[in-house]
Amino acid sequence: MSLARVNAMGLKGVQGYPVLVELDLANGLPNFTTVGLPDDAVREARERVAAAMRNSGFAMPNRRVTVNLSPARPRKQGSHYELPIALALLTASGQVAGGEWSSRWCVVGELSLDGRVQPICGVLAMAARAKAAGFSAIMVPEANAEEARAAGIEALPVADLREAAELAGGALPRSRKGGPVSNAEAPEPDLADVRGQAMAKRALEIAAAGGHNLLFVGAPGTGKSMLARRLPGLLPPLTGDEALEVTLVQSAIGRATPGLVRERPFRAPHHGASAAALIGGGPFSRAGEVCLAHGGVLFLDELAEFSRPALEALRQPLEDRRVAVARARETVEYPSRFTLVAAANPCPCGWRGHPRKACVCAPNEVGRYLSRLSGPLIDRIDLQIETPAVAFGDWAAATTTGESTAVVRARVCAARERQRARWNSSAAPVNAFVDAAAFRRGARLLPEALETLAAAERKSALSARALDRVLRVARTIADLSHREEVRASDVLEAASLRGLDRLRSGLEVAV
């Protein structure tokens, strides 16, 4: 036969979509043409496919080869079309028998020149889409086999083109031995190592329990970064649905691990990162840091050193919990449900408000420095905490008196279980992420708490968004105390943790 069809998968963002590889052999001068909006990597596949076939003991047909990737409209990107193209070429030239496998299986993989099948990005998303499309199995590179199985579909791992051809011809899969699995984990930073900063530790616990955004402002050396890096250790393990979502994102950008990702992401980009690096974009609509932090923590150290456009671009993902990267040819949507924790100095020199060190910054310098933290951005940060200088006695103490990460994490997990039962949601089970209408219906605010919230609004002119966030934090405080109703004391603590008197007055210079 001179025509062959093999099913493959494309990748758009974190979603796979079916692609049919059609290959035709015709008489004429030897040529290899690929159509169907291929990018440069797909067009270059002809060189790797030809070399891989020769070095695997197959004959490259000396005829005119036309490859069509259908449907034609989406642009085809990536090197994972090489294995299905090679199998289609072997089938069309009669070197591999055609059969039901070409309609029942989906095939993805990159070829090296010697015929080995290299690992690729996005296998989990492709495997999930293959299962939804009704395919019985997916042929994948050997290194991606566990990732594909996590989607619940039969995975056919192949190490080279010869093995892929043998499987298509009806041979049994090669036997494989599982490699050693290491259970060793790096010790996590312990919250007990942080000296002093009782209010900051309390805010960290509340942020972990409810998924609230958190900002530390203080002089250098007060423990802002140290506190922020202990937030992931306070979070509960990923649920099954969360692990699947996180793995989809990590796999799509090439950071996949065997099986499902079990640890929550912690991303800490440098303050020189551009808006595209934070949010996503570029010629290939790549995911940004807010997407890579999905399901975990995004830490922005030296917040005021980030560019104003980069910080303002954060407003939409902080509100919508997703990012839509729009380009002329396509729009790609990524999930970005994360907890933001940020740290900032109060001024360029860092010593503004310090009890013993004088600030040398002129008022206009402080204004320019803090102007990058706009009012709308600050309004989206639930907890705004000042970190005072650590007393020498706390620093020099022989033993720490604070609670360990394990103790605090137990309270956080209990609070999250209460929220999961209340909101009955696996996708957004914490107070910070619940839909506004559903939250207002289930918040269970006592009349005295509502009066306290009204008093806070009159005193500090809170926006509607800020009132909603104070209420969400108060709901989390009540959950940590194992109470179903939100009391006035919960609202008072939530308002105080926004820094409504001291911190916001310091930022009003800029906003």
Image (tube, helix red, strand yellow):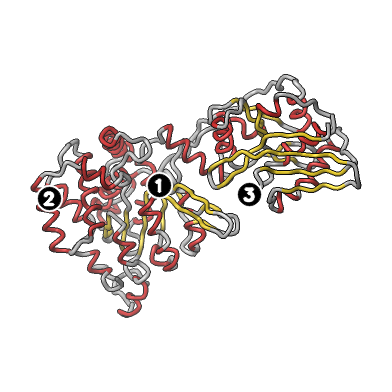
Q: Residue at x 36, y 35 (%)?
A: 426
Name the residue carrying label 2. 450
The three-letter amino acid code for the residue at tag 2 is Leu
Rendered location of residue 309, percent (x, y): 44, 67
Name the residue carrying label 1. 337
For this rendering, which residue is in front, 486 or 235? 486
Q: Quadrant of residue 82?
A: top right
The three-letter amino acid code for the residue at tag 1 is Arg
Name the residue carrying label 3. 73
Mark 2 and mark 1 residues within 8 Å of each other at the beta carbon = no
Q: Residue at x 53, y 44 (%)?
A: 14
Residue 349 in view here: no
In the image, 39: left or right of 265?
right
| SS assignment at label 3 | loop
Q: Quadrant of the N terminus?
A: top right
How far is the residue under mark 2 from the one under mark 1?
29 Å
